[in-house]
Image (spheres, rainbow, N blue to C red):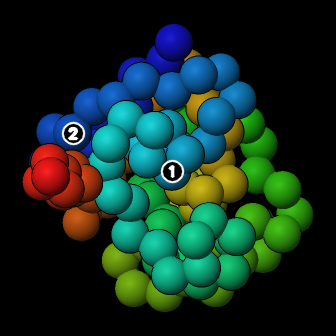
Amino acid sequence: MATVTVQPSGVRFGAADGQTIMAAAEAAGYRWPTICGGNGECLVCHVEVLAHPDRLAPPSETESRAVRGISGDHGGRGDQVRLACQAAVHGDVVVRKRGVRARRQEPSA
């Protein structure tokens, strides 16, 4: 199992081979920022890959087109910007994403 590290928070979680970053985070009990629920449409889940972009599956043409439209700090950085809902993990990676938090536990009845 690979490890995904999220900066600047230092959150770490495991990811099965081929699992997306977002799916792995949610399976580990973390809330990943999204509006579209992981359909690759809203771009809110985008990350900057800080280490080992080669350990993510290559982006689909749809994902490549989508990240080209991201402006601001991450725009125009090629394979360093990925959608967490689309990027399948194949080894340890380090990404930058703010807003990743542990899910709240519902109180027991």
Q: Nearer the viewer, residue 9 or 76?
A: 9
Residue denoted by label 2: 11
Q: Is residue 91 above or below residue 61?
A: above
Residue 11 position in % (x across, y down): 21, 39
Residue 58 position in % (x across, y down): 77, 42
Crowd tier of the residue under label 2, counting other residues whose Cα lies within 10 Å: few below 14, some 14–19, many 20 or above = some
Inspect this view and state whether residue 75 appears. no
Task: Classify mark 1: helix, strand or loop.
Answer: helix
Give amino acid for label 2. Answer: Val
Residue 51's label in the rendered image is: none
Give amino acid for label 1. Answer: Met
Residue at left offset 44%, top offset 59%: 47
Residue 14 position in % (x across, y down): 42, 24
Q: Is residue 63 above or below residue 17?
A: below
Task: Classify mark 2: helix, strand or loop.
Answer: strand
**Among the 4 quarters of the image, the one containing residue 6:** top left
Left or right of 93 in this view: 60: right
Pick whichever of labels 2 and 1 is earlier in the sequence: 2
* Residue farthest toward the front in the current orientation of the protein: 109
Inspect this view and state whether residue 67 appears. yes
Residue at left offset 65%, top offset 21%: 17
Left or right of 25 in this view: 67: right
The number of callouts visible is 2
Residue denoted by label 1: 22
Residue at left offset 75%, top offset 65%: 63
